[in-house]
Amino acid sequence: MAPLTPNEMVMESYRLEQLGLFSGALDGYQRALEAAPDHLAAAIRYCRLRRDLRTEPPSDLKILWQIDPRENYWETDWVRYLLSGLNCTEIIDARYEQFHDGCIVIDNRIGPQKTGYYFELMKRGHRFGVFHLSDEQFYDDCTAYNFANFVVRNYWSRALAADRKVLAVPLGMMNGFRAETQKPSRERSHIWAFAGTRRCCPPCRPFRAGFTTALMEPNLRRPLLPPRRI
């Protein structure tokens, strides 16, 4: 019988992984890497499985800023509000030099040049999440999502909708405003609201008109204020 190729080793190891035979799967991925050190699928599966088999919790939780919140970013107060229920410390790196187990990395403009940083986090066995800001035009590279335990992003994407580890959250207030929750969502008289102008860039105008109409639909209850032309 001919020896298995690296691709066949990865396929067989993945089968063992699905069967819960993790030790055999790790051995198979390692053999594939020994035969083909640049085999990306083998490296990702090996590092991710080895990390996921860790049983001890991180020593503490950290918010790891890879954008500098002291600069002019609109979302920093909103991010801090969303994560305010966590008992964690903040670290401002913004140089992609720090690696921590149990961290939530705050980042934007994620491109191929940043993939190596996130792969290294996974390679070191670190459990981490990514809070991906901006990307409203879907230009960013989401390869790093493959290395994270979970991802929170601002904009819902149809391409990512089936990925259970990716959570899309709404845009919040910009810096300088406060968010105070007075009622649980199920007790509020208005499901959602919009504050802004309908005058925007041409590609967005149909969407603005659509959600203005949606605000008027009976099943969404009535709007806070009737829409008006600006």
Image (tube, grey):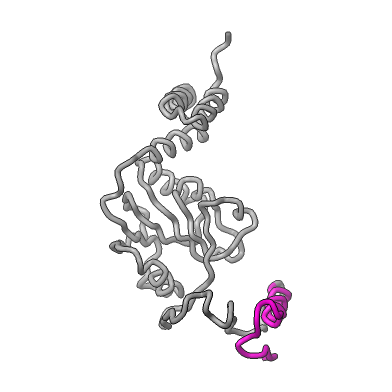
Q: Is residue 183 above or below residue 36?
A: below
Residue visible at 37% across and 48% down in the picture = 127
In the rendered view, does 126 fall on the left or right side of 36?
Answer: left
Quadrant of the rendered structure where residue 139 is? bottom right
Place of residue 226 in the rendered image (x, y in percent of width and height, measured from the top left): 67, 90
How many numbered marks are there?
0
Quadrant of the snapshot with the N terminus: top right
In the rendered view, does 6 fall on the left or right side of 222?
Answer: left
Place of residue 199 in the rendered image (x, y in percent of width and height, measured from the top left): 67, 83
Residue visible at 39% across and 44% down in the picture = 120
Place of residue 47 in the rendered image (x, y in percent of width and height, measured from the top left): 42, 37
The residue positioned farthest toward the front in the image shown: 187
Residue visible at 70% across and 80% down in the picture = 218
Q: Is residue 227 magenta?
A: yes
Q: Is residue 15 magenta?
A: no
Please name whichever residue, 81 or 180, is drawn nearer the observer in this view of the structure.
Answer: 180
Quadrant of the snapshot with the C terminus: bottom right
Place of residue 123 in the rendered image (x, y in percent of width and height, measured from the top left): 39, 40
Please name whichever residue, 71 or 169, is drawn nearer the observer in this view of the structure.
Answer: 169
In the rendered view, does 138 fall on the left or right side of 107?
Answer: right
What are the residue bounds of the magenta stretch? 204-230
The residue positioned farthest toward the top in the image shown: 1
Residue visible at 36% across and 57% down in the picture = 95
Q: Is residue 66 above or below residue 189?
A: above
The residue positioned farthest toward the left in the image shown: 59
